[in-house]
Image: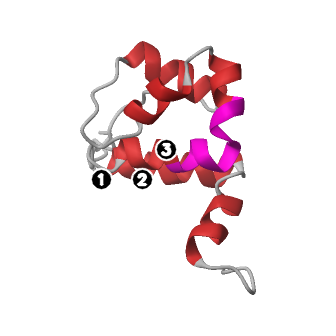
């Protein structure tokens, strides 16, 4: 639901401060295999939390962060993990949903 009096982007920035919402936002890009949107989603969450604070928390300078959040970027898993940690999030790997095997 949109917060009264805010435009879409301001409303999104407020919602992205919530770890559950931010997690779902980033995860949706991964589930949809939208690797062009993934760095943008990470950038949106980072902006919502403040790039200066993220730079301080991660030890990654702002210039590098801006490059990571460009859709043409290809950051290392180490850097992504560092950024996610700085945002209070973590990467998770789990099995793909598979059809249930019938038990005999």
Could you say whether the residue bearing mark 1 is in a helix, strand or loop?
loop
As drawn, 4 above or below 53 = below
As drawn, 28 above or below 43 = below
User: How far from the left and from the top, in percent, is residue 94?
Assistant: 42, 30
What residue do we see at 45% from left, 18% from top? 79
Which image quarter: residue 61?
Answer: top right
Q: Earlier in the sequence, mark 3 or mark 2?
A: 2
Q: Nearer the viewer, mark 3 or mark 2?
A: 3
The furthest residue to the front: 63
Could you say whether the residue bearing mark 2 is in a helix, strand or loop?
helix
Q: Which mark is residue 76?
A: none
Q: Which residue is mark 1?
A: 32
Q: Which residue is mark 2?
A: 28
* Residues under numbered marks 2 and 1 in contact, where contact means CB atoms less than 8 Å apart: yes
What residue do we see at 56% from left, 29% from top? 84
Q: Nearer the viewer, mark 1 or mark 3?
A: 3
Q: Is residue 58 visible?
A: yes
Check residue 82 for magenta coloring: no
Which quarter of the rendering shows the N terminus?
A: bottom right
Q: Which mark is residue 43?
A: 3
Stretch in magenta: 44-53
What residue do we see at 64% from left, 54% from top? 16
Disc 3 versus disc 2: distance between alpha carbons? 14 Å
């Amino acid at each position: 639901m949109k917060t009264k009096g805010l435009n879409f982007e301001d409303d999104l920035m407020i919602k992205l401060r919530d770890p559950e919402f931010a997690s779902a936002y980033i995860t949706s890009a991964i589930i949809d295999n939208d690797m062009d949107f993934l760095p943008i989603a990470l950038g949106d969450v980072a902006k919502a939390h403040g790039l200066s604070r993220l730079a301080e928390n991660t030890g990654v300078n702002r210039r590098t962060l801006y490059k990571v959040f460009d859709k043409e970027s290809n950051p290392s898993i180490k850097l992504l993990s560092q950024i996610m940690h700085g945002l209070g999030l973590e990467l998770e790997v789990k099995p793909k949903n598979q059809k249930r095997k019938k038990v005999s």
